[in-house]
Image (cartoon, rainbow, N blue to C red):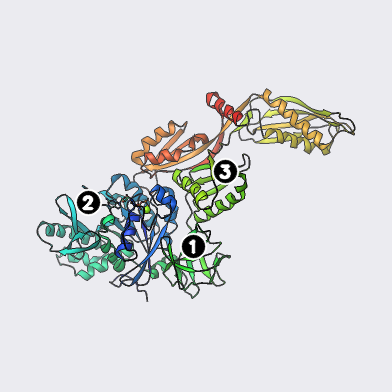
């Protein structure tokens, strides 16, 4: 039975813990240390040697960073724990965001690095908003001058809830040699890849401990009046009470405890595991948070679904209610997701067949052909309401892709669908005008990894290009022009003759066609053909782009009883436009978007300069509502300049800045830039 609520009762049953945190803070290394310390693997691998359980895909090894979720299950003191190692790069953040609803607790791995604080703030906000209990793990404290004396001063600004220091470091010379646990009031020295050893708590360390413990208790007392009174009256609270408060306040998200360690040496890992064991909530609370209905049918949440190299599908899912085993047919919403063909224990890419998955367990379900990342799966006939819906961030960068070999076109289409199923933060767009397949994603690396997967995993070699900008052209002056198509080639001839009155329309006016024929000089039944001909010609104006914002009126013409036909009038209409447009002072139009950039205030000046350098027109900036220390910059900017804007925004904001854009209007573009675009278009044709 899972017990819940604070009061010293520890949650039981399988746990699901996410390792999250800023880029390169040591999450994958920490996972490795946890697996080694809990006996799931024999030896702790390293990122440098490329032999860790996490990051085992070819792409992750190659780039030396996490590019997808890794799940690994282990056992600690009789309990089953699944850790979800999430990528830290903002470009792969959807893999983290999608798992958060179903986890019991997040371990936020961070470093004492000022530059990574904005990113830490983003992650903590997300956890706070979703009410997910979280523990901060300050990693890499082995680094000389890690600044670990002042953890709270550096990190508290990133968290809206109070951080609560659980440990203080102890030193031998300049190097950290151990820690004092402020709840246990015990001192430890670190041993490499072994449990820390208890040492006497004495001298200066004992004094430091007293002060640090007092501030820990003070913070706890913010949410416990009894403790507050004890502190005011100088009464030592019983140790059990301190642990109860730590447990309850973590589970209720009132505080965020801070632990520390060195993942590479597995220091601090056992402390972390013990905190998870005793203090983190379990499936009972998590199911309650998600509103899982009590009942016997299995309900599971898909943390990530993957198309493996061997072509099979594996869905990493957590069972939130009931029991799901081999042969269970699962619904996703009202559709069938498939029939489970194998339940697997996962330790990264190593899989081991196992029996049915019970409530709280996180496993791999094989061959759920239609499952997508983020789906809620239900056994039985009645679908459980979706447990969570995590909307991906809108994409910010695009490339146009095509299969290197024509014969792979169909395969490419299928592979792209699979990619989007695994990773909803990728979208695919077919541009009907240019026939381009445009792959949208969250950044350069995200798109690069996507194309690598297309070739490594799905066997489709890809060519990539810059996607075309949606240029248009229009006219500045009107003209009346005749279009005449006449052919006498023995037998049946062809005859169509029209007079067109062409006029510019205001910006955004699009295209309109009107007929003003009197006396039947062009018979009614041919008029639609004339319009078709006009539309044909407008698809490709004299500058090479679709023509917009003009009106065309059919004002006169003539026909021949035998030789006229739809085709002849279509060609006449087309000819009229082709001959007219060059006389109408054609001009290029480029799309301008309204862009909104969110950035930490200290980067606002840089962002303004960056926008100005890209032909942006700054409309102003405001503080970002609900975001302390952030601004929102608004500007209008040509689509051509938005291309890789995200790359520069990120480099100006230590990766924390984001932007959104939406089409605003088309604007005339003349001069050198326009000439270059037109010349490039001609060359491409
Ligand atoms: N000195 C030191 N280096 C560490 C520690 N933990 C990890 N590293 C190094 O930090 C780098 C990043 O480690 P990873 O484990 O890949 O970090 P990560 O958070 O998983 O990275 P992403 O998933 O790409 O965000 C590697 O070079 C590790 O060897 C540590 O405790 N001390
Ligand atoms: Mg990693």
User: As drawn, is 518 to the left or to the right of 682?
Assistant: right
In depth, the one of 294 and 332 nearer the eye is: 332
Res 404 label = 3
Which element carries disc 1, helix, strand or loop? strand
Position of 312 with respect to 108 (left or right) is: right
Q: CA distance from mark 3 to mark 2?
A: 52 Å
**Mark 1 or mark 2: whose residue is earlier in sequence:** 2
> SS class of the residue under badge 3?
loop
Q: Which mark is residue 148?
A: 2
For this rendering, which residue is in front, 278 or 157?
278
The residue mark sitting in front, 1 or 2, is 1
**Crowding near pointer 1: few (<14 within 10 Å), some, many (20+)?**
many
The image quadrant where one finds the C terminus is top right
Residue 76, image quadrant = bottom left
**Residue 182: image location, x then y, percent:** 20, 62
Q: x and y percent of residue 498 in the render? A: 79, 29
Foreground residue among 215 and 209: 209
Marker disc for residue 315:
1
Decide: few, some or many residues near mark 3? Use Cα within 10 Å; few <14, some 14-19, many ≥20.
few
Task: Work out which residue is located at the far left of the displayed protein and give it.
Answer: 203
Q: Is residue 426 visible?
A: no
Is label 2 in a helix, a strand or a loop?
helix
């Amino acid at each position: 039975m899972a017990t819940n609520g604070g009061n010293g009762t520890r949650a039981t049953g399988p746990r699901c813990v996410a390792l999250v945190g800023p880029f390169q803070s040591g999450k994958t290394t920490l996972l490795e240390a946890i697996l080694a310390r809990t006996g799931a693997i024999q030896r702790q691998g390293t990122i440098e040697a490329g032999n860790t359980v996490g990051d085992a895909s070819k792409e992750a090894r190659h780039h030396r960073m996490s590019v997808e979720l890794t799940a690994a299950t282990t056992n600690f003191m009789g309990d089953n724990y699944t850790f979800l190692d999430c990528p830290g790069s903002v470009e792969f953040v959807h893999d983290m965001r999608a798992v958060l609803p179903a986890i019991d607790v997040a371990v936020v791995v961070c470093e004492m690095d000022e530059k990574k604080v904005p990113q830490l703030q983003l992650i903590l906000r997300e956890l706070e908003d979703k009410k997910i209990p979280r523990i901060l793990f300050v990693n890499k404290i082995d680094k000389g001058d890690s600044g670990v004396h002042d953890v709270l001063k550096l990190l508290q600004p990133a968290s809206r809830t109070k951080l609560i220091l659980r440990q203080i470091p102890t030193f031998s010379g300049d190097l950290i040699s151990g820690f004092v646990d402020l709840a246990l009031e015990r001192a430890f020295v670190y041993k490499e890849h072994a449990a820390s050893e208890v040492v006497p708590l004495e001298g200066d360390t004992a004094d430091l401990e007293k002060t640090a413990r007092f501030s820990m208790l003070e913070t706890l007392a913010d949410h416990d009046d009894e403790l507050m009174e004890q502190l005011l009256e100088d009464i030592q609270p019983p140790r059990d009470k301190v642990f109860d408060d730590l447990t309850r306040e973590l589970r209720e998200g009132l505080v965020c405890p801070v632990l520390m360690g060195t993942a590479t040496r597995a220091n601090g890992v056992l402390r972390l595991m013990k905190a998870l064991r005793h203090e983190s909530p379990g499936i009972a609370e998590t199911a309650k948070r998600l509103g899982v209905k009590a009942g016997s049918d299995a309900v599971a949440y898909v943390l990530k679904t993957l198309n493996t190299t061997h072509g099979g599908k594996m869905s990493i899912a957590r069972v939130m209610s009931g029991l799901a085993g081999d042969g269970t047919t699962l619904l996703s919403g009202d559709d069938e997701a498939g029939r489970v063909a194998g339940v697997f224990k996962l330790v990264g890419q190593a899989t081991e067949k196992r029996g049915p998955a019970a409530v709280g367990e996180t496993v791999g379900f094989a061959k759920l052909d239609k499952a997508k990342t983020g789906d809620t799966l239900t056994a039985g006939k009645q679908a459980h309401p979706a447990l969570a819906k995590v909307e991906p961030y809108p994409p910010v960068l695009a490339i146009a892709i095509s299969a290197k070999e024509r014969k792979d076109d169909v395969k490419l289409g299928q592979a792209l669908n699979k990619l989007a199923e695994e990773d909803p933060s990728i979208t695919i767009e077919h541009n009907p005008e240019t026939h381009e397949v445009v792959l949208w994603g969250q950044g350069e690396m995200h798109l690069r990894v996507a194309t690598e997967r297309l070739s490594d995993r799905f066997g489709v070699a890809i060519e990539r290009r810059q996607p075309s900008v949606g240029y248009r052209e229009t006219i500045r002056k009107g003209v009346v022009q005749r279009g005449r198509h006449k052919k006498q080639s023995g037998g049946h001839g062809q005859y169509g003759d029209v007079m067109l009155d062409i006029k510019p329309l205001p910006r955004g006016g699009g295209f309109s066609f009107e007929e003003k024929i009197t006396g039947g000089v062009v018979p009614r039944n041919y008029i639609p053909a004339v319009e078709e001909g006009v539309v044909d010609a407008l698809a490709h104006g004299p500058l090479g782009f679709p023509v917009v914002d003009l009106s065309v009126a059919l004002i006169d013409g003539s026909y021949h009883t035998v030789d006229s036909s739809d085709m002849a009038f279509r060609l006449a209409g087309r000819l009229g436009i082709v001959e007219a447009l060059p006389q109408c002072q054609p001009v290029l139009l480029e799309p301008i978007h309204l862009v909104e950039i969110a950035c930490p205030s200290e980067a606002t000046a840089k962002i303004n300069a960056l926008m100005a350098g890209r032909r942006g027109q700054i409309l102003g900036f405001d503080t970002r509502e609900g975001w302390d220390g952030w601004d929102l910059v608004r500007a209008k900017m040509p689509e051509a300049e938005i291309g890789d804007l995200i790359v520069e925004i990120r480099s100006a904001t230590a990766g924390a800045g984001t932007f959104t854009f939406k089409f605003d209007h088309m604007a005339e573009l003349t001069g050198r830039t326009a000439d270059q675009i037109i010349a490039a278009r001609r060359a491409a044709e």
